[in-house]
Amino acid sequence: MSSIQDLLCCSVAELTERFVTQSRSIPQGLLEALEADTRQGARALARRLRQQQGRNRSEGQRLRHLLRFETELWEQGHLHVAGVDEAGRGPLAGPVVAAAAILPRGWKLEGLDDSKKIADESRRDEMAEAIKQGAVAWAVGQAEPEEIDRLNIRRASLLAMHRALQGLGIQPSFVLLDAFTIPECTLPQRGIIKGDALSLSIAAASVLAKTTRDRTMRELDTLYPGYGLAEHKGYPTASHVQAIHERGVLPIHRRSFAPVREALGLPVPPSPQGELFPGPDPR
C-alpha cells in the first residue's frame, strides 16, 4: 500500500480517480494530510471525500435498518427468508407479476429500495441483475389478464406471488410480504405494511417484479404497436385510454377494469379500484 507521503506526491486528478471514481479504501491519515495540503484542489478533495464517507455511513445505516426483519428471523434460525412482492396491480393491460428473493445473510446492495423509489429504469435493471447474481435463489411468477378478470386483481396478485414462491427451487423457512399474506401458502409468513420500503428482501423482490413486468410490456409493445405500451407500461394514462377507444381492445387488456369495459360499451358497476370483482374480495 502506498504511504501517505507517496500519495501526496500524486496529482489531485490522480487522487480523485483513485478514491472517488474507483472508490478505493481511504488510508488512515490521508484526509488529514489533504486538509493540511497547500493545494486548494487537495483541500477540496478532502471535503468531497468526507462528504462521501458521511453518505456511505448513512447508506450503511439505512441498509442495516432494512434488514431488521430478516436479521431477527436469521437469529431465530430461519436460514432462508424469502421476500415477495408484485408489480402491475393498477394497469389496464398485461399480467400482474410477482417475484420472490432469498438473500444471503447480511447481504446488502447500495441504493436498493422499493422499486417505485428508483426512478431511473436503467438503474433498476442494473440492480435486478445484481440481485439475481447475489441472491441465494430468486424466481418470478405471474397471472395473466384472463386470470385477473376471472379471479379479481387481488386474488390474481396472490396467485402470482404463490407461483413465484413455488419457482424458487429452495423452500424458504419464512416468507415476508408487502402488506398481504398468501392464503394458499402453508409456510410461516408475515405481511408488512409498506414492506417494500421496510424490508430489503421485499425491496429486492419489488425490483425483480417491476423490471420483469416492464420488460414484458416492452415486448408486448412490439406485438401491438400504436398503444404506447413501452412508455406507460399498460397504466391508465390519457393516451392509453384514448388508444383503446380509437384502436380497440386488445387480448392483453383486462376486461374487468372500468376503462376497458367502457371502451367495450359494457356497464361499469362501482368498485373500490375501478375494476370489477367476479367473486368476493377476500380482504
Image (tube, grey):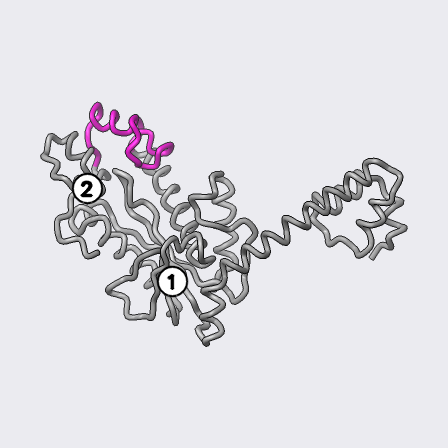
**77 is higher (above) or lower (below) than 223:** below
Kindly state the secondary structure of the residue where label 2 is placed.
loop
Asked whether 208 or 196 is in front, the reply is 196
**In-image side of 118 versus 91 (left or right):** right
Q: Please give the name of the residue rendered at 45% of the width and 75% of the height, measured from the top-left corner.
A: 76
Coordinates of residue 224 in the picture (x, y in percent):
29, 32
Q: Which mark is residue 62?
A: none
How far across and how far down the image is residue 52, in percent? 68, 46
- Residue drawn at point x = 90 percent, y = 51 percent: 5
What quarter of the picture does the C terminus occupy?
A: bottom left
Write the start and end of the magenta stretch as one range.
224-250
Quarter-of-image position of residue 218: top left
Quadrant of the frame with the N terminus: bottom right
Q: Residue at x 22, y 45 (%)?
A: 145
Left or right side of 20 for 151: left
Alpha carbon of mark 1 to alpha carbon of mark 2: how far? 27 Å
Would residue 237 be counted in the magenta stretch?
A: yes
From the image, tell me which residue sits under label 1.
Answer: 176
Quick check: is 217 in the magenta stretch? Answer: no
- Check disc 1: other Cα within 10 Å, few if <14, some if 14-19, many if 20+: many
Residue 272 in the image: state x and y as whole percent. 20, 43
Q: Is residue 254 left or right of residue 51?
A: left
Q: Is residue 46 above or below residue 159?
A: above
Identify the image quadrant of residue 21: top right
Mark 2 residue crowding within 10 angstroms, few (<14) / some (14–19) / many (20+): many
* Residue type at the position of mark 2: Glu
Residue at the limit of the structure toward the top, as seen here: 246
| Residue labelled with disc 2 | 275
- Mark 1 vs 2, N-terminal side: 1
User: Quick check: 250 above or below 171?
Assistant: above
| Residue type of the residue flagged with mark 1 | Leu
